[in-house]
Image: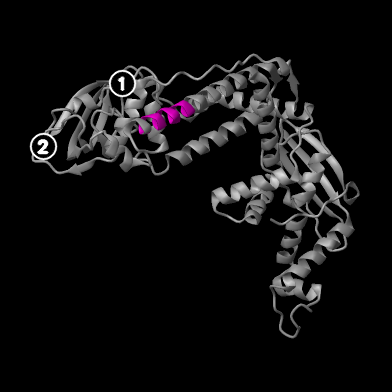
């Protein structure tokens, strides 16, 4: 990963700093010598890539090389050297904490070799945070719930089904434990709900993987025949809250049916599914894994309680413009998640019984909580004087590169093209602040 040269305060100055609602505008001037150095660096880099007729490789003068590739293209590369590094530097001189990517005002830019580089940057920032007594939050971590024998048996049976063989059967009547493929629609009050309907879905009858009580209605149905049955929708944990507890009418067809030949749950099965000598060893491993899951759940519950306490501990007045930008982001994110689904964003809204304005109102409370939590953690990180070292940041970039299967330099270029390097560091500071508070609450 390429390391950038350190800059010092004498290299630039902030000509103007304005805050309107949530938008901070910085007008910055970079010293002419820094600009000249950037031109020389770009010249040196391009000499390795560009060949100009009549000149030996590596010996093309800067003006000639600039004309050869186009002055605009050359200036674009110089701009990449200067931005967003001096945006970061100018931002660091302010007391504001950014929340968005940066945008540069093109008409305010002036870039020419040997002259100061002037640019304007706009970024949304957090408002002032007033912290309460965050060091004495009450969010005690509860011990994990014990693992019940029934949980172990359930996981064991799931693993048994995973290793089962499927076979065709002359019996076309659905029984519990069968592996089937089906398509169905769900109608409520005479209207089909695409978000609840499925096409060519597969399930093991009895697992109730789709919805509680659904599978019992399939037992006894015939493959190839159409079926209809009434279904009480769950009273909680349904995405469309307005449908919870309602009665639905399910219409569909079982398209394929396979019987499962389940292996015996014995020592041989334990040897087949893993390096276990006996079935008891396998059960012990399942119990151990479940205990870890319960511990993780307890950690997550504690984290949620701590977040709630943090939100209550701070006071932040967000301008409406900032809230609207966050709602815009969440709506676009939802639209992206719905791409590839068998229903559109408009279908989703219709089945929720809302328009986009109503959806935004539903999203608003959580958006405000999340914004407030970020702002509070930012302030705590500042008061605790937490820092992110260059080594820690480099490690995060390497982790992101590995996760995205990209080169670290490519990740850095992506971050810097939008001014997100500072946002990534801020996110790491929030993680540190939260981890410190978690440790204090245990």
Front residue of 154/93: it is 154
Left or right: 106 in relation to 174: right
Q: Quadrant of the C terminus?
A: top right
Residue closest to the eye, 164 or 372: 164
Q: Circle 1 is placed at which residue position? A: 233
| Corner quadrant of residue 189 | top left
Q: Residues within 10 Å of mark 2 (few under 14, many from 20)?
A: some
Label 2 secondary element = loop
Q: Position of residue 121 (x, y in %)?
A: 75, 45
Q: CA distance from mark 1 to mark 2?
A: 28 Å
Which residues fall within the magenta stretch? 282-293
Which of these two is toward me, 270 or 136? 270
Left or right: 185, with 14 as reference point: left
Quadrant of the rendered image containing residue 222: top left
> Is residue 288 a member of the stretch shown in magenta?
yes
* Numbered disc in front, either 1 or 2: 2
- Residue 387 appears left or right of 221: right
* Residue appearing at x 81%, y 43% in the figure: 90
Secondary structure found at label 1: loop
Principal secondary structure, stretch drawn in magenta: helix
Instruction: Provide the residue designation for mark 2.
Output: 172
Labelled disc at residue 373: none
Q: Position of residue 94 (x, y in %)?
A: 82, 36
């Amino acid at each position: 990963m390429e390391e950038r040269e350190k800059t010092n305060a004498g290299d630039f100055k902030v000509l103007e700093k304005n805050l309107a609602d949530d938008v901070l505008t910085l007008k910055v001037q970079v010293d002419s010598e820094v600009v000249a150095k950037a031109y020389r660096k770009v010249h040196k880099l391009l000499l390795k890539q560009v060949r100009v007729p009549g000149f030996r490789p590596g010996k093309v003068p800067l003006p000639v090389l600039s004309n050869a590739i186009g002055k605009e293209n050359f200036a674009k590369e110089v701009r990449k050297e200067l931005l967003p590094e001096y945006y970061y530097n100018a931002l660091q001189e302010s007391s504001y904490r950014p929340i968005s990517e940066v945008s540069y005002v093109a008409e305010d830019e002036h870039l020419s070799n040997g002259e100061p580089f002037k640019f304007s940057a706009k970024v949304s920032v957090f408002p002032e945070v007033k912290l309460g007594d965050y060091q004495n939050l009450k969010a005690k971590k509860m011990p994990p719930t014990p693992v019940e024998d029934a949980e172990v048996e359930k996981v064991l049976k799931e693993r048994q089904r995973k290793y089962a063989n499927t076979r065709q059967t002359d019996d076309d009547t659905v029984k519990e434990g069968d592996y089937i493929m089906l398509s169905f629609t769900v109608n409520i009050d005479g209207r089909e709900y695409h978000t609840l309907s499925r096409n060519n879905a597969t399930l093991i009858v009895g697992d109730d993987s789709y919805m509680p009580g659904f599978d019992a209605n399939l037992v006894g149905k015939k493959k190839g025949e159409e079926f209809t049955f009434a279904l009480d929708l769950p009273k909680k944990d349904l995405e469309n809250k307005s449908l919870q507890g309602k009665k639905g009418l399910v219409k569909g067809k079982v398209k394929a049916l396979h019987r499962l030949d389940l292996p015996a749950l014995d020592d041989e099965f334990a040897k087949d599914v893993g390096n276990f000598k006996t079935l008891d060893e396998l059960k012990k491993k399942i119990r151990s894994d479940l205990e870890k899951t319960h511990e993780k759940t307890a950690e997550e519950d504690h984290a949620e309680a701590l977040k709630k306490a943090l939100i209550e501990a701070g006071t932040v007045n967000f301008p409406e413009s900032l809230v609207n930008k966050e709602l815009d982001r969440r709506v676009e994110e939802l639209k992206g998640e719905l791409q590839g689904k068998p229903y559109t964003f408009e279908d989703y809204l219709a089945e929720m019984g809302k328009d986009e304005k109503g959806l935004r109102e539903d999203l608003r409370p959580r958006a405000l909580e999340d914004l407030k939590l970020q702002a509070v953690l930012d302030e705590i990180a500042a008061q605790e004087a937490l820092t992110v070292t260059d080594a820690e940041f480099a490690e995060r970039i390497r982790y992101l590169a590995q996760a995205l299967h990209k080169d670290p330099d490519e990740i850095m270029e992506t971050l810097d093209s939008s001014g997100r390097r500072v946002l990534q560091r801020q996110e790491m500071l929030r993680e540190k602040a939260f981890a410190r508070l978690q440790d204090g609450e245990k």
